Image (cartoon, rainbow, N blue to C red):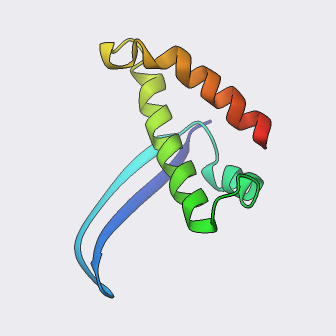
């Protein structure tokens, strides 16, 4: 089951958004459930955890979909080890 998300990023100058982008994406994982599970367990601040998990899930979904792309040929095996280590931290 694919979970649907709308991602919005705003570039801030002070309290004013001066640039924005937004896009729709899907992910095989429920990102909010992962955030609930790991928040406070990695030794990161709440904001760092959010950025890390959201960035990781966006990246990994593209890597899974494009696993045959030469860009991921050397990184793929290392990423599997990284994910195993991350999951053992939870």
Q: Residue furthest left?
A: 18
* Picture layout, residue 17 above or below residue 65: below
* Picture layout, residue 3 above or below residue 32: above
Q: Position of residue 23 (x, y in %)?
A: 33, 54
Q: Which quarter of the rendering shows the C terminus?
A: top right
Between 89 and 19, the one lying in front of the other is 89
Residue at image position (38%, 51%) is: 24
In the displayed structure, does residue 3 sit left or right of residue 65? right
Q: Residue furthest bottom?
A: 15
Q: Position of residue 87 (x, y in %)?
A: 73, 35
Between 30 and 45, the one lying in front of the other is 45
Residue at image position (63%, 66%) is: 46
In the displayed structure, does residue 77 sit left or right of residue 23? right
Q: Residue furthest front?
A: 43
Residue at image position (44%, 26%) is: 63
* Picture layout, residue 74 above or below residue 62: above
Q: Position of residue 61 (x, y in %)?
A: 48, 33
**Total numbered labels placed on residues in the image:** 0
Q: Which quarter of the rendering shows the N terminus?
A: top right
Which quarter of the picture shows residue 89?
top right
* Picture layout, residue 80 above or below residue 58: above
Residue at image position (74%, 61%) is: 40
Which quarter of the picture shows residue 16?
bottom left
In the displayed structure, does residue 36 sit left or right of residue 17? right
Q: Position of residue 53 (x, y in %)?
A: 57, 49
């Amino acid at each position: 089951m694919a979970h649907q998300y709308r991602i919005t990023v705003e570039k801030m100058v002070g309290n004013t958004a001066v640039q924005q982008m937004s896009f729709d994406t899907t992910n095989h994982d429920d990102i909010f459930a992962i955030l609930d599970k790991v928040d406070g367990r990695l030794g990161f601040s709440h904001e760092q955890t959010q950025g890390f998990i959201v960035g990781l899930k966006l990246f990994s979904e593209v890597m899974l979909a494009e696993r045959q792309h030469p860009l991921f040929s050397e990184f793929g095996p290392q990423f599997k080890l990284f994910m195993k280590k991350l999951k053992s931290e939870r």
